[in-house]
Image: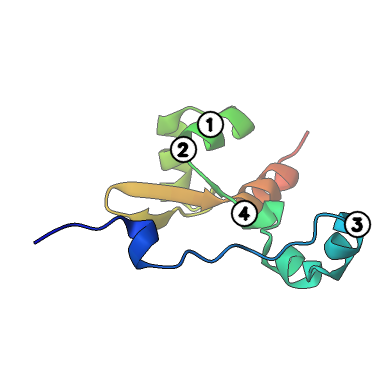
Amino acid sequence: MRHRRLSQTYAIPTPAAPTDDLFGYAQRMPIAGALALAPTLDDELWSVKIVRMKTGLSRASVYKYMALGLFPRQRHIGPGRIAWRASDIRKWIESRPE
């Protein structure tokens, strides 16, 4: 059996983007949907390393405060992976006395 080149067998479509009217093309792009899908900073998930940096707590203190109910609970995001929502940590930081 002979192998043919991919370009000989299948027609590869080329995108039809106008090169002379890039400004008009960019204005016609639907950015409202793209902006709606962009995550906000409060939707971020922070690892224990980032939580330690932001709060100044040690790893042991984070887990001790969680056990006492004084710190937000972590989320399980995969096998062996946990994270905290950034909004929960920011609220906790704001609730701390100065």
> In terms of secondary structure, where does tag 2 sit?
helix
Q: Which residue is mark 4?
A: 88
> In terms of secondary structure, where does tag 4 sit?
helix
**Residue placed at 54% from the left, 29% from the top?**
57
Q: Nearer the viewer, mark 3 or mark 4?
A: 3
Q: Earlier in the sequence, mark 4 or mark 2?
A: 2
Cα gap from disc 4 to disc 1, whole angstroms: 14 Å
Is the C-beta separation of discs 2 and 1 under 8 Å? Answer: yes
Mark 2 is surrounded, within 10 Å at the Cα level, by few (under 14), some (14 to 19) or many (20 or more) other residues, namely some
Q: Which residue is mark 3?
A: 23
Cα gap from disc 3 to disc 2, whole angstroms: 44 Å
Q: What amino acid type is highlighted by mark number 2?
A: Val
Q: Position of residue 83 (x, y in %)?
A: 46, 49
Q: What amino acid type is highlighted by mark number 4?
A: Asp
User: What's the image's color scheme?
Assistant: rainbow
Q: Earlier in the sequence, mark 1 or mark 3?
A: 3
Q: Nearer the viewer, residue 33 or 98?
A: 33
Is the C-beta separation of discs 3 and 4 under 8 Å? Answer: no
Cα gap from disc 2 to disc 1, whole angstroms: 6 Å
The reply, left or right, for residue 29 in relation to residue 9 is: right
Mark 1 is surrounded, within 10 Å at the Cα level, by few (under 14), some (14 to 19) or many (20 or more) other residues, namely some
Image quadrant where residue 3 sits:
bottom left
Q: Which residue is mark 2?
A: 48
Cα gap from disc 4 to disc 2, whole angstroms: 13 Å
Q: Which residue is mark 1?
A: 52
Q: Determine whether 7 is above or below 37 in the image.
A: above
Q: Nearer the viewer, residue 57 or 38?
A: 38
Q: What amino acid type is highlighted by mark number 1?
A: Arg
The reply, left or right, for residue 41 in relation to residue 83 is: right
